[in-house]
Image (cartoon, rainbow, N blue to C red):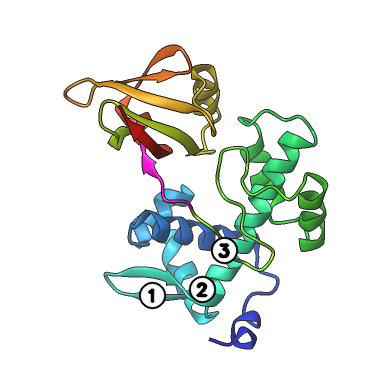
């Protein structure tokens, strides 16, 4: 697919369009079909509001849409989604590293700023803090060229007892959850060892540094790790 054919459909997208493309990208990445209800849930809007925007995005060449199969990003749509994701994650990184924001405060600020910041400003921010590869929550930052390197990660909840892993990434959408994880020491780069799985979806006991921590099964499913070993 030639760059010329994709570049002409991505200039000057509105904030709502960028939000839709990000939502569809996230749904595709998670393996979930980007159907109307799933997009509405992701964006916290009524399903009735989604149909018209989906048709508009399809007309713009940013997605394809099949009934019962949901929306899928085209090459141009994926490029636009990654551009917005880059802005969001660079802003988060800049706020923490250059301005001293805590990691639980940067998501909402980045949501507000990501649609207004120019590519030049984002590139200057990234350069000023040493071209970070990840945001404060461990999510990889897309390159200026629109490429993204994703590590192979698994949920902490999926690890067996005795497994040791490194925390790679946590969701940035809940400030309260981030504050709680920080209190537990469960942050990107931390090493955790699974000690016990309680039955019936009970908590998972892990060792973080020298401390034992109990983490609910649902939350443990949202902590993405890279397995290191099993002893």
Q: Residues within 10 Å of mark 3 (few under 14, many from 20)?
A: many
Read off the residue under disc 1. Answer: 65
Furthest residue to the left?
A: 200
Residue under the image location 54 percent in, 33 percent down: 189
Q: Residues within 10 Å of mark 2 (few under 14, many from 20)?
A: some
Residue sitting nearer the eye, 231 or 74? 231
Above or below residue 113? Residue 217 is above
State yes or no: discs 1 and 3 in contact (Cβ < 8 Å). Answer: no
Q: Nearer the viewer, mark 2 or mark 3?
A: 3
The location of residue 36, given as percent across then percent down, is 37, 61
The local secondary structure at tag 1 comes to strand
The location of residue 65, given as percent across then percent down, is 38, 75
In the image, is 197 to the left or to the right of 89? Answer: left
Write the start and end of the magenta stretch as one range.
151-156
* Mark 1 / mark 3, whichever is N-terminal: 1
Residue under the image location 17 percent in, 22 percent down: 199
Read off the residue under disc 2. Answer: 57
* Mark 1 / mark 2, whichever is N-terminal: 2
* Mark 2 / mark 3, whichever is N-terminal: 2
State yes or no: discs 1 and 2 in contact (Cβ < 8 Å). Answer: yes
Q: CA distance from mark 1 to mark 3?
A: 17 Å
């Amino acid at each position: 697919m030639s760059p010329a054919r994709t570049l002409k459909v991505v200039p000057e997208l509105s904030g709502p369009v960028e939000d839709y493309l990000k939502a569809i990208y996230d749904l595709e990445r998670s393996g979930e079909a980007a159907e109307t209800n799933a997009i509405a849930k992701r964006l916290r809007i009524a399903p009735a509001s989604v149909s018209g925007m989906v048709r508009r995005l399809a007309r713009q060449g940013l997605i394809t849409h099949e009934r019962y199969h949901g929306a899928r990003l085209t090459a141009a749509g994926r490029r636009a989604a990654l551009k917005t994701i880059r802005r969001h994650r660079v802003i988060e990184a800049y706020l923490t590293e250059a301005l001293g924001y805590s990691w639980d405060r940067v998501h909402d600020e980045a949501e507000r700023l990501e649609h207004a910041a120019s590519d030049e400003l984002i590139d200057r921010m990234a350069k000023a803090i040493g071209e970070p590869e990840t945001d404060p929550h461990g999510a990889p930052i897309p390159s200026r060229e629109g490429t993204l390197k994703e590590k192979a990660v698994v949920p902490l909840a999926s690890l067996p007892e005795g497994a040791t892993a490194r925390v790679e990434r946590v969701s940035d959408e809940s400030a309260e959850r981030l504050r709680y994880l920080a209190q537990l020491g469960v942050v990107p780069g931390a090493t955790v060892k699974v000690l016990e799985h309680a039955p019936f979806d009970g908590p998972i006991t892990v060792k973080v540094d020298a401390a034992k921590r109990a983490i609910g099964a649902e939350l443990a499913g949202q902590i993405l790790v890279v397995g290191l070993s099993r002893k």
